[in-house]
Image (cartoon, rainbow, N blue to C red):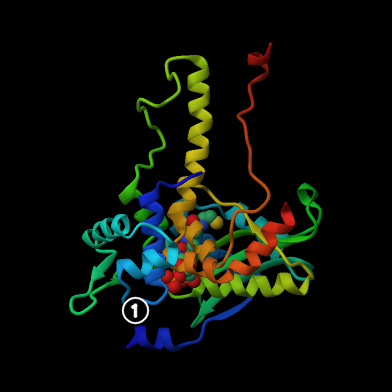
Amino acid sequence: MAATADADEALRIRPAVAADVPAVIALDEEVTVLAKPAYWHDMFERYGARGRRARFFLVAERLDRLKGFVIGETRAWEFGSPPCGWIFAIQVRPKGRLKGVGTQLFNAICDRFRETGVVNVRTMLALDNITILSFFRSQGMMAGPFIELETTLESSADRT
Amino acid sequence: MKLQKATCFALFAVLELAADPARQLSAAEIAEKYDISQHHLAKVLRDLARAGIVESARGVGGGYRFAGNPKRLTMMDVIELFEPIRPDRADGDDPRPNTDIGRALRTVLNEIDEHAQATWRSISVSTMLKIVRQRPVAVARDQTKT
Ligand SMILES: CC(C)(COP(=O)(O)OP(=O)(O)OC[C@H]1O[C@@H](n2cnc3c(N)ncnc32)[C@H](O)[C@@H]1OP(=O)(O)O)[C@@H](O)C(=O)NCCC(=O)NCCS
């Protein structure tokens, strides 16, 4: 009855440690089909290493297995905005979805943001990723006062 | 952005019924609450029933009940039943699509449409009902903006 034991065991949310990085890389590879070890080691250095105030890299685990993670930071005056919590990444193992893990990770990082004194939380999402858009909307998030704009840089040869 | 009348009526009915799935309401009751045409709403409710989103309850005073999955049914699922939402509409009312300005206008209109679609597609009935319940806060916030 492994499945029942797994469901009964409480989910634990805690700050990531270096030993979690391989499991984070594996989870991300499972979701995006692209292994990015250097990127995740760098993310851990920047957000997860000890003593980082206002930077958070949290993992959700059950029975010592990584079920998901979330990364964010309280940033001040970015784009002229007062301090605000930013969520950069959230991922839950495909097999463990729709069981509230994402919600618990979201709530946990919001608690951390609150401790830094901010009242707003922000994120940026791909317009065509309806799963993650639906998830953040189900948490009460709505379009904010900013919009992302971008362009493709012309090569310098094209500009002359 | 403006929704057509039938779409709006459908959203009123779906959200009103989904707010309490055990409750049964007639077209007349919903029409009265929103001050809309009962005749038009009755037709919209029949379309919603055909799509399986509401079900009609038989018996005395038979009304309608919500029959969808509120966490999975999106605003887009309802809207699409009543009006076409297409990102690349090459239909007759496109402003002069064979001119440079017409094409440029279409590019910008597509950008607006893409945002509108992603918004409707990512808001489930449950999420919408949360917004309904938060309304006093949201209204207060919107008022401070103006
Ligand atoms: C988005 C994600 C984090 C959600 O995690 P989760 O553990 O499944 O989330 P929860 O179970 O807490 O879901 C909370 C709510 O989100 C919404 N939601 C989540 N997944 C959904 C889906 N596939 N379709 C519609 N709504 C969804 C629902 O409203 C859900 O509430 P419900 O379970 O009561 O219906 C997870 O799906 C994921 O990792 N997706 C891939 C993320 C990704 O693309 N990352 C790359 C960019 S960072």
Q: Residue furthest left?
A: B59
Q: Nearer the viewer, residue A6 or B118?
A: B118
* Picture residue at 68% right of the left edge, 75% below the top: A111
Which secondary structure lies at badge 1?
A: loop
User: Is residue A86 in view?
Assistant: no
- The one nearer the camera, B81 or A15, is B81
Q: Quadrant of residue B93?
A: top left
Residue B139 appears in view = yes
Q: Is residue A55 left or right of residue B120?
A: right
The residue that mark 1 highlights is B23
Taking A137 as reference, is A42 left or right? right
Say above or below: A125 vs B131: above
Q: Is residue A42 above or below residue B25?
A: above
At which x and y percent is residue A154?
A: 63, 22
Q: How many marks?
A: 1
Amino acid type at circle 1 is Arg
| Chain bearing mark 1 | B
Residue B56 in the figure: left or right of residue A52: left
Q: Which residue corresponds to the image point at 65% horizontal and 53% vertical from the top-left?
A: A144
- The structure residue drawn at horizontal position 48% and vertical position 60%, both measured from the top left corner, is A134
Residue B103 percent coordinates (x, y): 48, 21
| Ligand 1 lies under 8 Å from the Cβ of mark 1 | no
The foreground one among B16 and A19 is: B16
On the image, the x and y values in percent for residue A122 come to 66, 58
Q: Mark 1, residues whose alpha carbon is within 10 Å: few (<14), some, or many (≥20)? A: few
Q: Position of residue B32 (x, y in %)?
A: 40, 66
